[in-house]
């Protein structure tokens, strides 16, 4: 099937005025566009002088944006012009199609732009699956190259800097991510979550006024060394996380204070008494039962005259675990909140 080529100039290549479409054919799901340059000549890239003297021409094959779900291929005739200027080192130069594509590219610029957007949103495999549905056949590596092609975004040193760790492989390799807390954009990534790299980064990026961080000592140290004048604050996420944990521990420790619910009054639809109901999952209760049993076991062995070290060996537990149970008068004391931990406030408590 052949289409009217003048419509293509205005519709499909609107804004790309350097192109003259001569023939369009559609066959087997592919639109074939034959085109050539429209201008009488071009400017030499070295001396800038215009030349219309054609040396020869060659074919370029360019993939373009799909049309109605069909892939589009542009067969482009490129002329090579002779630069006749005596003082110019260049003899010939190829006709540029600056709006359509870049030298040596196999795709049009607008197709590359779409692939870059898809690659940034979906990366390699998922992006390749999506574009093949849209009529663009390309591999995942092509998309990944488009993602890596744009230059890294430039940033200015933020006034309010967020510092937090993140795991590259969960629980194995930790790095530090620096964010601007005002624009919520990633500023940099440091290779570890230790004090040194943060201090070095802050020293080379002066101007940070507030450092919003988690409560890790390493970040406090790094911030103190690298930006001694900056105000350090705990970020909201870690405050909420700390509060959540404290409430959970407190509620668990006071579990025994909860009154057992009164047995429900039997109704006509209830099964007769004695029929077992569905099991009720109660992980907190199981944990408490485990602690209760462990506490009883340790104290029984202590009563039999075994040493704490011998009990740890016998049970295969850590010595600290056995010491914790041995110290606790009641098993409830082994729940975390009731375990007194040394604090820098201790000297002042009396
Ligand atoms: Zn020239």
Image (cartoon, rainbow, N blue to C red):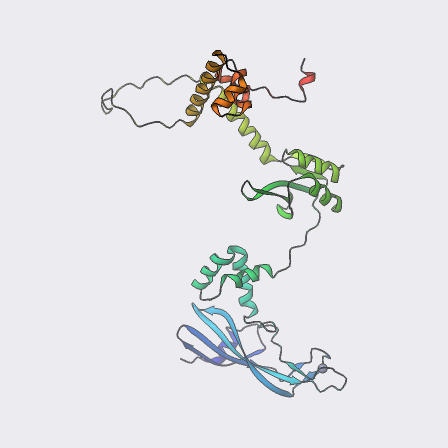
Quadrant assignment for ligand 1 = bottom right
The reply to whether residue 156 is visible in this rendering is yes
Residue at image location 52% in from the left, 56% down from the top: 123
Q: Nearer the viewer, residue 243 or 346?
A: 346
Could you tell whether 247 is left or right of 190 in the image? left
In what quadrant of the picture does the C terminus appear? top right
Q: Position of residue 275 (x, y in %)?
A: 25, 23
Residue at image location 60% in from the left, 87% down from the top: 56
Could you tell whether 191 is left or right of 71 in the image? right
Could you tell whether 332 is left or right of 93 in the image? left
In what quadrant of the picture does the N terminus appear? bottom left
Label total for image:
0
Q: Nearer the viewer, residue 280 or 266?
A: 280
Q: Dividing the picture into quarters, in which one does residue 235 lie?
A: top right
7 above or below 243?
A: below
Residue at image location 45% in from the left, 16% down from the top: 296
The reply to whether residue 206 is visible in this rendering is no
Residue at image location 44% in from the left, 23% down from the top: 290
Q: Position of residue 48 (x, y in %)?
A: 72, 79
Q: Dividing the picture into quarters, in which one does residue 106 lie?
A: bottom right
Q: Position of residue 187 (x, y in %)?
A: 65, 48
Q: Nearer the viewer, residue 257 or 292?
A: 292
187 above or below 335?
A: below
172 above or below 21?
A: above
Could you tell whether 12 is left or right of 348 in the image? left
Q: Position of residue 289 (x, y in %)?
A: 42, 21
């Amino acid at each position: 099937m052949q289409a009217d080529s003048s419509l293509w100039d205005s519709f499909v290549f609107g804004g790309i005025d350097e192109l003259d479409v001569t023939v369009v054919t559609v066959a087997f799901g592919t639109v074939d566009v034959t085109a050539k340059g429209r201008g009488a000549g071009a400017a030499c890239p070295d001396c800038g002088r215009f030349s219309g003297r054609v040396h020869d021409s060659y074919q370029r094959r360019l993939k373009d944006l799909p049309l109605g779900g069909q892939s589009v291929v542009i067969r482009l005739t490129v002329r090579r012009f002779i630069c006749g200027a005596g003082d110019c080192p260049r003899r010939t130069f190829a006709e540029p199609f600056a709006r359509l594509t870049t030298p040596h590219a196999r795709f049009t610029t607008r197709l590359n732009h779409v692939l870059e957007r898809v690659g940034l949103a979906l990366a390699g495999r998922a992006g390749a699956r999506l574009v093949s549905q849209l009529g663009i056949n390309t591999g995942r590596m092509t998309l990944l190259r488009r993602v890596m092609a744009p230059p890294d975004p430039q940033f200015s040193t933020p006034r309010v800097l967020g510092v937090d760790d993140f795991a590259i492989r969960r629980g194995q390799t930790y790095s530090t991510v620096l964010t601007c807390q005002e624009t919520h954009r990633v500023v940099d990534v440091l290779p570890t979550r230790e004090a040194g790299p943060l201090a070095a980064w802050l020293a080379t990026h002066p101007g940070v006024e507030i450092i919003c961080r988690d409560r890790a000592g390493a970040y406090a140290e790094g911030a103190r060394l690298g930006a001694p004048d900056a105000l350090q604050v705990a970020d909201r996420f870690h405050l909420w996380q700390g509060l959540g944990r404290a409430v959970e521990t407190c509620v668990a420790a006071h579990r025994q204070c909860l009154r057992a619910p009164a047995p429900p009054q039997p109704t006509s639809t209830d099964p007769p008494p004695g029929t077992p109901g569905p099991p009720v999952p109660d992980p907190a209760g199981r944990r408490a039962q485990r602690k209760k049993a462990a506490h009883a076991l340790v104290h029984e062995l202590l009563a039999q005259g075994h040493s704490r070290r011998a009990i740890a060996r016998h049970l295969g537990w850590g010595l600290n675990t056995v010491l914790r149970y041995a110290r606790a008068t009641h098993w409830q004391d082994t729940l975390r909140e009731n375990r007194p931990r040394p604090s820098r406030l201790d000297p002042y408590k009396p």
